[in-house]
Amino acid sequence: MNAEKLTEYLDSLIPLGIPSVDCMVYKDHTCIYRHMTGHTDNNRTIPVSNDTQYLMFSMTKVQTMTALMQLVEQGKISLENPVANYLPAYKDLTVSNKEGEITPANPMLIKHLVSMQSGLDYNLERPGILRILKRDGMNATTRDLVDSFVESPLSFQPGTHFCYSLSHDVIAAVIEVVSGMSYGEYLKKNIWEPLQMNRTHFAKPVNHEPGLSEQFIMEGIPGQIVPMAPTCNYQLSECYESGGAGLVSCTEDYAKLADTLACGGVSKDGVRILQSKTIETIKQNLLGPDSLKDIETTMGRKGYGYGVGMQVLMDPQAIQSTAPAGVFGWDGAAGSCITMDTNSKISLVYTMHVRNCGMAYGIIHPTLRDMVFTQE
């Protein structure tokens, strides 16, 4: 990694309109790089700092998969088990086809949820959600809302295609059932406190807390970056805890998690949250040929597979990447990303706070990946 060139690249993003960026790189429990620049408010008066927090959106999924695999290690959940073993509402699934709605040929399994092959979608206005919110309002719970997802038919037979969806929100409800805790309580006890992630918590539908970066959005073509309300639309109620997109955190907290996963599940302080063989399981591609086509065409992830809730670089040559095969991680709707490599024990966390910013996924993240993980 060339630190000078990395800094130069990060600085070049500010003139493009991105208000602020922050980047941390760890290698084997040592922070070998940190650079932040820009401002977190539209008036450009508040510099980005160590204390800046962000809506993490789908980077939440990395924690959800970590939590799930802890329970898999303990024998309390199996990836091969039907979801209905934990959530009885999922016994009554239907699948939409040309003739109407039919019963699935096979049950939805936990592995279908983690690999986004469940048949669910990301429609936040599905009839079941609207019904529960009308009934319970901001008191609607994670379990009640997740159970309501099945009131709409699946888009395809479980296990046959990839569709980015609410699947990991369902995993959060499964964790609640198995652990006997709220999802937030489980994360606090088993991930946040062990790793001293003291500035990580669940967002609300609208957020006004001190230290939270103003949220921006890219609008129009060419894109203009403008401020937007501090909303997290994936937090469906005040009581809902979205396993797919619900967390607020900061760069340093996520860097602790990234370093721990890159180092085989052991933190800088020697705390083990996962076994190394479990992390290798997370990195195994679960997508078949049709699903691999889906993730490439719908999400632009050519060369990548998808394991337990995270993308895995399978074919670097297919995308002219200089990073090694096996690099894994995920990103979030406001442009942040977390990327890890267990072989080199290097991890990268990059944060920004701009919604609908296509260049984050198509340009910035691949550039950072190749600058940080370049094979020597």
Image (tube, grey):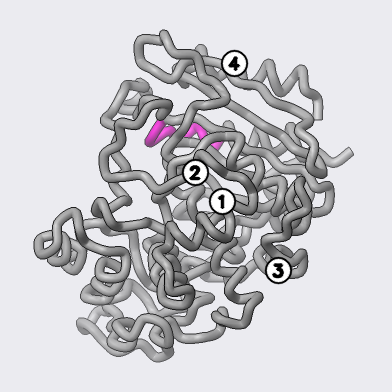
**76 lies above or below 242:** below
Closer to the eye: label 2 or 4 = 2
Whole-number angstrom distance, CA of label 3 to CA of label 2: 24 Å
Q: Amino acid at mark 3?
A: Thr
Q: Residue at x 84, y 41 (%)?
A: 375
Q: Measuring from the top left, give residue 46's x and y in whole percent.
A: 44, 13
On the picture, is 305 further left or further right than 262? left
Sequence-wise, the earlier of marks 4 and 1 is 4
Residue ID for mark 3 = 278
Q: Nearer the viewer, mark 3 or mark 4?
A: 3
Q: Is residue 286 left or right of residue 39?
A: right
Cα–Cα span, label 2 and label 4: 29 Å
**Quick check: is 361 in the magenta stretch?**
yes
Which one is in front in this view, the residue at disc 4 or the one at disc 1?
1
- Image coordinates of residue 61 in percent, x first then y, are 50, 55
Circle 1 crowding by C-alpha within 10 Å: few under 14, some 14–19, many from 20: many
Q: In the image, residue 244 lies at what x, y percent?
A: 43, 56
> Which disc number belongs to residue 200?
2
Q: Amino acid at mark 1?
A: Trp
Q: CA distance from mark 3 to mark 4?
A: 38 Å
Secondary structure at badge 2 equals: loop
Please count the marks in the image. Answer: 4
- Residue at numbered disc 4: 12
- The answer to which of marks 3 and 4 sits earlier in the sequence is 4
Which residue type carries mark 2? Answer: Thr
Q: Nearer the viewer, residue 81 or 184?
A: 184
Residue at the location (39% across, 69% down)?
Answer: 173
Label at residue 192: 1
Which one is nearer the viewer's eye here, 39 or 299?
39
Q: What residue range appears in magenta?
A: 354-363
